C-alpha cells in the first residue's frame, strides 16, 4: 500500500478516514485487508496528534474496533465472529459512501428547512389516452377515419368503367345528322334535334355540332324558349350532306 501523505485532510469521522484509505489505495470495499488498513489508520492518528490536531474519541473507538477484528481473524475458533464483524464494518462503510454521494448531489441544490428546489428534469411524455367516450362516438370516429382512408386509395378499375366503356360520339357525325334533318324540311324545331339522343354524350355532341354550324354560317338559330327554330341557309339546301362532310 502507498505511504500516507503528511498533508492530512480534515476527516469528519472515523468512517470518513477509513473510506479515504480504501479509496486512496484502490481497495475492494467488500474485501478490506484489515491488517494493512489498521496500520495506516493508526499512522494517520499518530500524524494528527503530531500536528496538534484534536483526535476525537470516536477515532480511537474505531481503532479499537479494527484491533478487535484483526484479533478475531488470528484466532481459528473465532472465524465466524471475525467475519460478522467484517460484514458490519463493510456495511457501515457502504452506507457512509452512499450518504456522501447523495450529499454531493444535494449540495448544489437550494435546500432550506421548509423549501426544496431542484432543477427541472426532462420527463418522458405519457401518451396514455385516459378520456372515456360513449360507444356511438367511437363508432362515428372510426367510420370517419375509414372514409378518409378510402379517399387516399387510388381509384378502382370500376370507377373508370363508365368512361372507358362509353361509346365516343364525334361532333362530325352530329353535324351530318343536323344537316340531314334540315335537308328534308329546311327548318326544324330546336328540341327535336335532341329527341333521338340516347345518352349525354350524344346530346353534348349535337349541341357542339350546332355551334360549329352556326359559326360556319351554315345554319341560323332563331326564337326564344320552346319556340327556338333551326333553319338551314340557302347555300346548303342544294344537296344532301354525306358522312365525309366536315365543317
Image: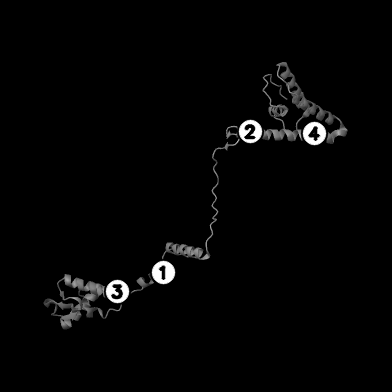
Distance of mark 1 from mark 2, alpha carbons?
Answer: 73 Å
Q: Secondary structure at mark 4?
A: helix
Read off the residue under disc 2: 103
Read off the residue under disc 3: 201
Q: Secondary structure at mark 2?
A: helix
Mark closest to the chain's N terminus, 4 or 2: 4
Q: Is residue 155 found left or right of 108 in the rendered image?
A: left
Residue contact between numbered discs 4 and 2, judged by CB atoms under 8 Å: no
The residue located at (88%, 34%) in the rendering is: 77
- Pick out the residue farthest to the left: 234
Mark closest to the chain's N terminus, 3 or 4: 4
The circle on residue 85 is 4
The circle on residue 206 is none
Nearest-to-viewer mark from 4 and 1: 4
* Residue 29 seen in the figure: no
Mark closest to the chain's N terminus, 1 or 3: 1
Snapshot quadrant of residue 183:
bottom left
Q: Measured from the top left, where is residue 146 in percent x and y?
A: 47, 64
Instruction: Pick the quarter of the image with the C terminus.
Output: bottom left
As drawn, 17 above or below 204: above
Mark closest to the chain's N terminus, 1 or 2: 2
Distance of mark 4 from mark 1, alpha carbons?
Answer: 87 Å
Amino acid at each position: 500500500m502507498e505511504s500516507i501523505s503528511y498533508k492530512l485532510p480534515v476527516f469528519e469521522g472515523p468512517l470518513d478516514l477509513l473510506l479515504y484509505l480504501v479509496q486512496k489505495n484502490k481497495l475492494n470495499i467488500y474485501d478490506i485487508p484489515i491488517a494493512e488498513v489498521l496500520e495506516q489508520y493508526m499512522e494517520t492518528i499518530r500524524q494528527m496528534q503530531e500536528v496538534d490536531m484534536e483526535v476525537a474519541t470516536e477515532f480511537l473507538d474505531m481503532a479499537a474496533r479494527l484491533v478487535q477484528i484483526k484479533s478475531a481473524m488470528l484466532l481459528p475458533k473465532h472465524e465466524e465472529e471475525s467475519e460478522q464483524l467484517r460484514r458490519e464494518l463493510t456495511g457501515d462503510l457502504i452506507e457512509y459512501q452512499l450518504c456522501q454521494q447523495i450529499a454531493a448531489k444535494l449540495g448544489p441544490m437550494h435546500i432550506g428547512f421548509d423549501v426544496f428546489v431542484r432543477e427541472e428534469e426532462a420527463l418522458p411524455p405519457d401518451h396514455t389516452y385516459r378520456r372515456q367516450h360513449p360507444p356511438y362516438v367511437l363508432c362515428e370516429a372510426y367510420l370517419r377515419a375509414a372514409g378518409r382512408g378510402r379517399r387516399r386509395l387510388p381509384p378502382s378499375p370500376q370507377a373508370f368503367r363508365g368512361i372507358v366503356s362509353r361509346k365516343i360520339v364525334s361532333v362530325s357525325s352530329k353535324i351530318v345528322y343536323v344537316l340531314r334533318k334540315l335537308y328534308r324540311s329546311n327548318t326544324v324545331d330546336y328540341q327535336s334535334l335532341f329527341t333521338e339522343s340516347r345518352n349525354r354524350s350524344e346530346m353534348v355532341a349535337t349541341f357542339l355540332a350546332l355551334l360549329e354550324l352556326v359559326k360556319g354560317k351554315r345554319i341560323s338559330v332563331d326564337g326564344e324558349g320552346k319556340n327556338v327554330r333551326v333553319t338551314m341557309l340557302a347555300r346548303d339546301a342544294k344537296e344532301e350532306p354525306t358522312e365525309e362532310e366536315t365543317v
